[in-house]
Image (cartoon, rainbow, N blue to C red):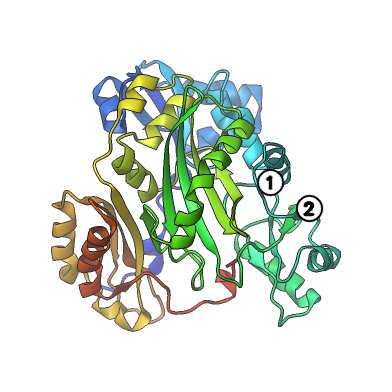
């Protein structure tokens, strides 16, 4: 039977950007989502049409939508989202939502950068304006070679573009407009142009997952991004904690001061923050901040390192019932080292990626205590015109980094997985 790409890769309805309604009671001493659920908390996904109604701000639509989130007579104690969207809906679902101002700040890059500078946190030199040849020329004249362009709103990496020297200003403008359209971003969106951060085109980038409890930073999990700046399309194919790059280690002592400045700028007493930063001229420069945990296996790795699930920290802060500081500070992690890999299969090897061949791999992943989480995509099709994705995401915990990487290789190497794509095209042109 011939499968189709849509059959195997089409998203489930409501699967993108979910928001969870929270019911029952939250034990402030719980440290993980399963612990909290065992102690009396329940969660249910809010239907997308309810979120859309709440986003309108209409009082009539809001009243009807809030009625729909009452499940079986349970008391709604709040709601939580784990990306940067649905802020109006979350504000409606959480009375006196403590995260509102901070979430608005981090999605306005120009204002965020200004506030960070005011708290002594380094950011790239920048300029904001409408997308035009004038903006591009200004960036070339004032921000150094091959500047970066990205939407001035939002906290993600969609729509990031680096100037291409082999093209004219006009052709860069035309290409960037198409990159924005491919990412479903309105070309009328204000654009922020910034200096490229990376000496000799060798960028050093980290992400930091920070737990803030009772106005104190209790945990900071630093992931080295090993492949995000190495080859197109610049995705996080491999992330490791603790970092092994000597350049990162040399400048880690200055990181606490940077994080303290960020927390002061954000202004939250309780929060989970996901911070993207680059090393430039031996100083950490902030790229983006999410008032939320890192996504996917990043949150699982942080839990393994600290014993505290940043997703629960974020949930508790979102509903206005923060976790107990004593429980959070007393927590201990299971592993010293973690490695996360998002692996792909080259085009010539895709016919070998079958469910039958990978059943033994799935069995090993499912039964291994050191596997923090995994997702295997092994679609089978005999349609030459459709090429569904094939690959695996997996997280490993270990007592040290050599053990973690060796274990990771032992899982993925026999199946021809790689952390880099075989090619890049216009759609994947983003900023190195």
Query: Camera-side residue: 128 or 224?
Result: 224
Is 66 in front, or is 26?
A: 26
- The residue beneath circle 2 is 128
Query: Quick check: 422 above or below 69?
Result: below
Instruction: Name above or below for residue 134 compared with residue 90.
Output: below
Residue located 53% across and 37% down the image: 291
Q: Quadrant of the C terminus?
A: bottom right
In contact (CB < 8 Å): disc 2 and disc 1: yes
Residue visible at 54% across and 50% down? 276
Expressed as whole percent of the image width and height from the top left, the position of residue 284 reads 58, 51
Front-lying residue, 397 or 383: 397
If you read the primary sequence from the N terminus, does the residue marked by circle 2 or circle 1 appear first?
A: 1
Q: Is residue 85 visible?
A: no
- Residue positioned 56% across, 35% down in the render: 260
Question: Seen in the image, is 362 located left or right of residue 94?
Answer: left
Residue located beneath label 1 in the image: 109
Q: How many labels does the image show?
A: 2
Q: Position of residue 256 (x, y in %)?
A: 51, 40
- Residue 37 image position (x, y, % from top left): 28, 26
Please state, as top left, top right, bottom left or bottom right, where the N terminus lies in the image. Answer: bottom left
Quadrant position of residue 163: bottom right
**Left or right: 369, with 197 as reference point:** left
Q: Few, some or many C-alpha atoms within 10 Å of disc 1 (few <14, some 14-19, many ≥20)?
A: many
Looking at this rendering, what residue extends furthest in the right direction? Answer: 134
Q: What element carries label 1?
A: helix
């Amino acid at each position: 039977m011939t499968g189709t790409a849509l059959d195997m890769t089409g998203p489930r309805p409501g699967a993108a950007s979910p928001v969870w309604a929270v019911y029952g009671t939250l034990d402030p001493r719980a440290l993980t989502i399963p612990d909290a659920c065992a102690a009396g908390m329940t969660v249910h996904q809010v239907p997308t049409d309810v979120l859309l109604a709440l986003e309108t701000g209409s009082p009539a639509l809001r009243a009807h939508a809030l009625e729909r989130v009452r499940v079986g007579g349970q008391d709604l104690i709040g709601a939580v989202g784990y990306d940067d969207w649905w802020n109006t809906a979350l504000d409606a679902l959480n009375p006196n939502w403590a995260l509102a101002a901070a979430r608005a700040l981090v999605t306005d890059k120009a204002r965020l950068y200004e506030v960070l500078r005011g708290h002594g946190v380094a950011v790239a030199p920048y300029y904001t304006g409408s997308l035009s040849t004038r903006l591009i020329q200004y960036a070339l004249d004032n921000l150094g070679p091959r500047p970066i362009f990205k939407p001035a709103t939002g906290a993600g990496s969609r729509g990031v573009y680096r100037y291409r020297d082999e093209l004219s200003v006009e052709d860069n403008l035309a290409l960037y407009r198409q990159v924005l359209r491919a990412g479903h971003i309105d070309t009328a969106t204000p654009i922020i142009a910034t200096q490229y951060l990376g000496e000799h085109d060798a960028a050093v980038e980290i992400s930091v997952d920070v737990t803030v409890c009772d106005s104190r930073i209790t945990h900071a999990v630093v992931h080295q991004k090993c492949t995000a700046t190495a080859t197109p399309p610049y995705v996080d194919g491999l992330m490791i904690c603790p970092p092994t790059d000597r350049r990162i280690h040399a400048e880690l002592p200055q990181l606490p001061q940077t994080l303290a400045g960020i927390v002061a700028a954000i202004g939250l007493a309780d929060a989970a923050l996901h911070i993207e930063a680059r090393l430039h001229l031996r100083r950490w420069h902030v790229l983006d901040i999410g008032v939320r945990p890192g996504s996917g296996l990043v949150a699982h790795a942080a839990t393994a390192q600290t014993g505290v699930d940043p997703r629960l920290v974020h949930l508790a802060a979102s509903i206005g019932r923060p976790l107990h500081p004593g429980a959070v500070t007393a927590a201990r992690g299971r592993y010293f080292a973690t490695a996360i890999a998002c692996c792909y299969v080259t085009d010539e090897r895709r016919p070998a990626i079958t469910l039958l061949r990978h059943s033994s791999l799935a069995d090993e992943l499912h039964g291994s205590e050191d596997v923090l989480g995994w997702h295997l995509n092994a679609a089978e099709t005999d349609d030459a015109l459709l090429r569904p994705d094939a690959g695996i995401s997996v997280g490993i915990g270990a007592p040290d980094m050599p053990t973690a990487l060796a274990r990771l290789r032992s899982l993925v190497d026999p199946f021809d997985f790689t952390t880099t794509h075989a090619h890049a095209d216009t759609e994947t042109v983003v900023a190195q």
